[in-house]
Image (spheres, rainbow, N blue to C red):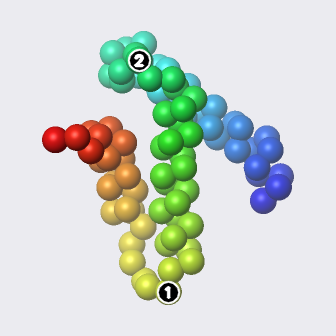
Amino acid sequence: MEEFSGGGFAEYLDIIRQTIEEGQKTGGFRKDLKPITAAKILYGALDEMVTNWILSKRDYPLAPMADEVLKIFFGGVLK
């Protein structure tokens, strides 16, 4: 885990950040958001879902959880 936490994590987070920046440039994402903060929020939410899935004693599919995270990330929670 320590090895991933250093270089691997930074590279993974950078891919997400770059994707968000590209979306901002093309008009798909809001420009008033800091790409690195948005990347950390998305990564953190997905990581939490995966951690709970791994540690859970229940058997359930993971993909719908990712869909729910992305629905909230892209759509927000405000009505």
User: Which amino acid type is shown beneath numbered disc 1?
Assistant: Lys
User: Which residue is situated farthest in the right direction here?
Assistant: 3
x%, y% of residue 46? 49, 54
Taking the spot 54% from the left edge, 32% from the top edge, the residue there is 37
Mark 1 to mark 2 CA distance (whole Å): 41 Å
Q: Is residue 78 above or below residue 64?
A: above
x%, y% of residue 78? 22, 40
x%, y% of residue 47? 55, 56
Please tell me whether mark 1 sits on a helix, a strand or a loop: loop
Q: Is residue 46 above or below residue 60?
A: above
Foreground: disc 1 or disc 2: 2
Taking the spot 71% from the left edge, 38% from the top edge, the residue there is 10
Give the residue number, with chain letter if any, for mark 1: 57
Give the residue number, with chain letter if any, for mark 2: 32
The answer to whether 1 appears left or right of 70 in the picture is right
**Image quadrant where residue 65 sits:** bottom left
Q: Residues within 10 Å of mark 1 (few under 14, many from 20)?
A: few
Taking the spot 83% from the left edge, 52% from the top edge, the residue there is 3
User: Which residue is situated farthest in the top direction here?
Assistant: 25
User: Which amino acid type is shown beneath numbered disc 2?
Assistant: Asp
